[in-house]
Every structure is written in structure tokens, then in C-alpha cells.
């Protein structure tokens, strides 16, 4: 299976104007929450868990590309 099959084009943001990794994460989760009730209801917990994981290992691939997976 190709990596691209896991990507939803609605959640690719090529021109985010943010100043920090935390702001990127919050912005992306906010955008997903607009379409997903479960994410909306648990948004703060999701953000907290992503930020915690970021302390352990970065989701940055490079060149401004990040992958965010909430398990």
C-alpha cells in the first residue's frame, strides 16, 4: 500500500502561516475538528497527547513536512 493512500487531501495544508511547532499542531487539529465531531469533542486531549509525543520524538520529516497520527 502506498503512503499516499493514508493521506486525506482535505488535511494537507501547504501554506500555513504559523510561528511554532505547537501552533502548527493546534491549527491542524482545529481544522480536522471542524469536520470530525470526535476530534472536536477531544481536541484539547488530542493536542496534549501530540505535544507530549513531540517531546519524545518529532513528527517532522523535513522541509516543513509533518505527519500527525493520533492513536
Image: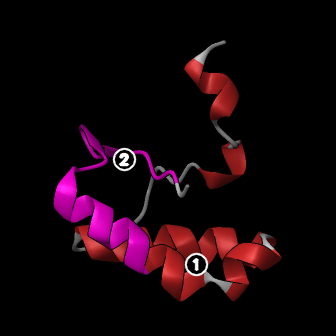
Is 50 positioned to the left or the right of 8 in the image?
left
Q: Which residue is pictured at 57% across the width and 48% down the height?
A: 12
Q: Nearer the viewer, residue 13 or 46?
A: 46
Q: Which residue is pictured at 62% across the width and 14% down the height?
A: 2
Q: Residue 46: x percent and y percent? A: 51, 74
Q: Which mark is residue 65?
A: none
Q: Residues within 10 Å of mark 2 (few under 14, many from 20)?
A: some
**Range covered by the magenta-colored residues:** 48-69
Instruction: Please say if 8 is above or below 21.
Output: above
Q: Residue 9: x percent and y percent? A: 68, 43
Q: In which quadrant of the rendered view does residue 39 lie?
A: bottom right
Which of the two labelled residues, at mark 1 and mark 2, occupies the earlier sequence position?
1
Looking at this view, name the residue that lies furthest to the top.
1
Instruction: Please say if 57 is above or below 52.
Output: above
Q: Residue 29: x percent and y percent? A: 55, 71
Q: Quadrant of the N terminus?
A: top right
Q: Give the alpha-carbon distance from disc 1 to disc 2, as whole Å.
A: 16 Å
Element class at badge 1:
helix
Q: Residue 22: x percent and y percent? A: 29, 74
Instruction: Please say if 65 is above or below 15.
Output: above
Residue 36 appears in the rendering: yes
Element class at badge 2:
strand
Q: Which mark is residue 66?
A: 2
Is 28 positioned to the left or the right of 1 in the image?
left
Is 12 positioned to the left or the right of 68 in the image?
right
Task: Give the labeled residue for mark 1.
Answer: 30
Residue 18 appears in the rendering: no
Q: Which residue is pictured at 66% across the width and 68% down the height?
A: 32
Amino acid at each position: 500500500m502506498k503512503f499516499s493512500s493514508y493521506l486525506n487531501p482535505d488535511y494537507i495544508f501547504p501554506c500555513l502561516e504559523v510561528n511554532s511547532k505547537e501552533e502548527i499542531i493546534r491549527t491542524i487539529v482545529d481544522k480536522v475538528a471542524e469536520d470530525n465531531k470526535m476530534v472536536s469533542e477531544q481536541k484539547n486531549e488530542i493536542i496534549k497527547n501530540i505535544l507530549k509525543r513531540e517531546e519524545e520524538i518529532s513528527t517532522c520529516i523535513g522541509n516543513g513536512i509533518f505527519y500527525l497520527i493520533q492513536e
